């Protein structure tokens, strides 16, 4: 192809031969059997007939009209705006036409989308026509021709690496035939089966890479063995100010068992807002300390890291665990003091942000790494913290506990975290106050703020969340402008403050501290308050332009209230003219974060499964929601192969290494909204 066509394909995300092959049709037109004219109904149809009469209309809106007849009747075919057809269609021509049929006059009419003039005596041969995602500059027809000319060369670059036994087990077509069937289909059932084969290969590559990674981690071992002695549970709970829930007990038992193995733990802890993940992390830290190992807890923001330190310090004090915090905003003297205590082992727990990753932070013996809101960190950042165990420590690879307060659907957890063990806290502690949620149109914002005032007069506080910092260049509500409007026009007698991500760390901390100490009544903020902020006196959360957020993120914001004894409310405000806000009503109907996450996934689709990126639009064929059953088949098959042959030495597995090549995995992603 020429550079001009290549540039047009690149606009569709097709920039390699592999991507061109994977650009499978989005639909198919079945043009095998023409419809007798007498049986035409409104809608899409194909017709084969002889031209009886032709009319051509010149002018600004050119039109070619032809009466087509077969043995059953006559239809009027119309070509709008096709000036190049003048003189090309003549009485006696035998035509195939495809288009949309309408009945408005004496004769049925067909607005022609595609046609072909059949040679004298030529028998009509029907076909299934693939329809590709296209642009105005690069129509589907041109893409279809390009792929047809290069199909066999493209297929030749994709050898069939799947073990023959798996192909036979699932009764799949050969991979080359599957590619032919999706781009040049023989029949529609063959298309469906071919797509299954191609998607299975994509998912199998992801699952195989994860299974090999897990097997390699478990076989290498080298972790500090931190065994749980008899009576340790009773000793641990005796020092707690409250009794753990059943879910917390179950998850802690799993984590302690993981830490007692020679293979380093690699576990993801999922817990809905307020489920008590901090206590579970504390249990892991206590066991590490008992075994003589230090722990590190990394959080994405200083606000969240500071709250972890403040919560964990009194919780861990009875166990003799000293907590040290490391932040980027610390002064040089305080920073050196904290680093010295961590390096000497005097501090058994280091809590911090990305500051923990700097070269100046070293550990005496790092045995446990806890990463909160793990999706906020890159793969390399998480690996850099784990690598600090080998700088001075003697205990080998550290155990890793990743935590997230964003409930992850079962479908996504099975894939994105396929090389991790997943534990779920699916029970909230007793006494959590239910949060009442309402979806309100922007025309009623005055009523919303009157409700905020009423709650403030009762001694409560409120958040107002805006999607942008400054609205000057966007159509979104800006936090700065909204804070100024509330101060001067809506709440001139109340204490209104503002918090956003571009503020210096000291200013952010000061604003949050004022709100925590109830020196602020209304805090206008961006989503910087989404995770970790814990102010029990806050009882109202107002989210402006709520239609701009995903359901899971709105659920996270809602979790900032309802943390005290007062009845709490979340009010989602959407513009009057914003469509598709029906999905927001899911939040009115349930507070189950996992049910919300499943709905959010179905609406927004999933992010990247493999590689180092945290999200992205890969545009590949498999879809984790629609094809989850197929993914589980591929995962079970991959797990079985790695379990029986972890080094892939079986001759039948010779081609599998190509499937886990880095380039293959980087392509094996799922579509994201």
Image: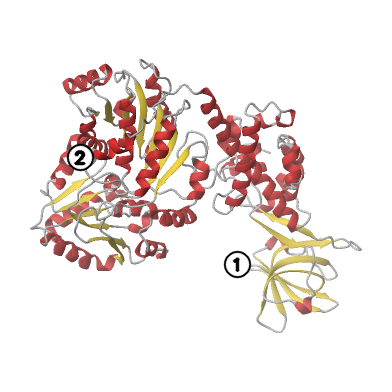
Depicted 99 relative to depicted 311: above or below = below
Residue 61 visible: yes
Q: Which residue lies furthest to the right in this view?
A: 121
The residue identified by callout 1 is: 60
Task: Return the mark for residue 187.
Answer: none
Q: Which residue is drawn at 17% across and 56% down?
A: 485
Structural distance between the alpha carbons of marks 2 and 1: 63 Å
On the image, the x and y values in percent for residue 415 come to 53, 43
On the image, the x and y values in percent for residue 96 come to 79, 65
The residue identified by callout 2 is: 508
Q: Quadrant of the N terminus?
A: top right
In the visual, does 220 lie left or right of 586? Answer: right
On the image, the x and y values in percent for residue 457 come to 10, 62
In the visual, does 624 lie left or right of 332? Answer: right
Residue 606 visible: no
Query: Mark 1: few, some, or many residues within 10 Å (few <14, many ≥20)?
Result: few
Q: Which badge, 2 or 1, comes first in the chain's sequence?
A: 1
Depicted 577 relative to depicted 635: above or below = below
On the image, the x and y values in percent for residue 653 come to 70, 31
Task: Name the secondary structure under disc 2.
Answer: helix
Q: Which residue is drawn at 75% across and 35% down?
A: 156
In the visual, does 277 lie left or right of 149? Answer: left
**Residue 162 or residue 155, whichever sits in front:** 162
**Residue 469 or residue 98, whichever sits in front:** 469
């Amino acid at each position: 192809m020429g550079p001009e066509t290549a540039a047009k394909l690149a606009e569709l995300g097709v920039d390699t031969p592999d991507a061109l092959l994977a650009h499978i049709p989005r639909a198919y037109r079945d043009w095998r059997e023409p419809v007798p004219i007498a049986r035409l109904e409104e809608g899409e149809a194909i017709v084969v007939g002889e031209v009886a009469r032709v009319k051509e209309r010149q002018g600004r809106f050119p039109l070619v009209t032809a009466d087509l007849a077969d043995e059953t009747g006559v239809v009027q075919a119309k070509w709008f705006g096709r000036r190049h057809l003048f003189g090309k269609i003549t009485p006696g021509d035998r035509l195939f036409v495809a288009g949309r049929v309408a009945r408005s006059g004496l004769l049925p009419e067909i607005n022609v989308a595609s046609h072909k003039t059949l040679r004298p005596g030529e028998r009509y041969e029907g076909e299934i026509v693939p329809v590709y995602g296209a642009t105005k500059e690069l129509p589907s027809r041109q893409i279809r021709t390009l792929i047809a000319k290069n199909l066999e060369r493209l297929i030749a670059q994709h050898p069939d690496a799947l073990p023959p036994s798996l192909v036979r087990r699932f009764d799949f077509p050969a991979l080359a035939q599957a590619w032919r069937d999706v781009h040049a289909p023989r029949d529609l059932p063959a298309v469906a089966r071919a797509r299954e084969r191609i998607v299975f290969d994509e998912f199998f590559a992801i699952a195989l890479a994860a299974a090999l990674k897990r097997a390699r981690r478990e076989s290498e071992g080298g972790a500090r063995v931190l065994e749980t002695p008899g009576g340790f549970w009773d000793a641990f709970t005796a020092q707690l100010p409250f009794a753990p829930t059943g879910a917390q007990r179950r998850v802690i038992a799993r984590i302690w068992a993981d830490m007692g193995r020679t293979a380093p733990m690699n576990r993801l802890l999922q817990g809905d807002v307020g489920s008590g993940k901090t206590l579970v992390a504390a249990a892991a830290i206590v066991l590490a300390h008992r075994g003589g190992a230090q722990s590190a807890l990394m959080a994405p923001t200083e606000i969240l890291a500071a709250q972890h330190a403040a919560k964990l310090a009194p919780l861990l004090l009875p166990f003799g665990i000293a907590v040290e915090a490391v932040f980027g905003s610390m002064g040089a003297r305080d920073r050196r003091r904290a680093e010295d205590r961590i390096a000497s082992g005097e501090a058994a727990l280091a809590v911090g942000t990305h500051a923990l990753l700097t070269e100046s932070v070293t550990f005496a013996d790092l045995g446990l790494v806890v990463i909160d809101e793990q999706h906020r960190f890159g793969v390399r950042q998480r690996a850099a913290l784990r690598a600090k165990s080998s700088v001075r420590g003697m205990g080998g690879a550290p155990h890793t506990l990743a935590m997230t307060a964003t409930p992850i659907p079962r479908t996504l957890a099975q894939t994105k975290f396929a090389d991790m063990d997943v534990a779920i806290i699916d029970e909230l502690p007793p006494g959590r106050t239910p949060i009442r949620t309402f979806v309100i149109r922007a025309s009623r914002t005055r009523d919303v703020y009157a409700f905020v005032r009423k709650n403030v007069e009762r001694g409560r506080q409120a958040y107002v969340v805006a999607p942008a910092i400054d609205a000057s260049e966007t159509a979104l509500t800006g936090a700065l402008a909204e804070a100024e409007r509330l101060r001067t026009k809506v709440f001139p007698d109340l204490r209104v403050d503002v918090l956003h991500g571009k503020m210096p760390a000291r200013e952010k901390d000061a604003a949050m501290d004022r709100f925590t100490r109830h020196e602020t009544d209304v805090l206008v903020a961006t989503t910087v308050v989404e995770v970790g902020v814990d102010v029990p006196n806050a009882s109202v959360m107002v989210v402006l332009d709520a239609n701009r957020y995903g359901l899971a993120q709105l659920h996270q914001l809602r979790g900032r209230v309802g943390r005290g004894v007062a009845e709490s409310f979340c009010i989602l405000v959407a513009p009057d003219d914003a469509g598709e806000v029906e999905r927001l009503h899911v939040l009115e109907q349930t507070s189950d974060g996992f049910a919300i996450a499943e709905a959010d996934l179905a609406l927004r689709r999933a992010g990247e499964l493999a590689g180092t990126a945290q999200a992205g639009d890969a545009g590949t064929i498999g879809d984790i929601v629609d094809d989850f059953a197929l993914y589980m088949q591929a995962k079970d098959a991959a797990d079985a192969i790695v379990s029986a042959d972890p080094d892939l030495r079986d001759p039948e597995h010779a081609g599998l290494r190509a499937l886990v090549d880095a380039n293959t995995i980087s392509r094996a992603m799922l579509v994201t909204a």
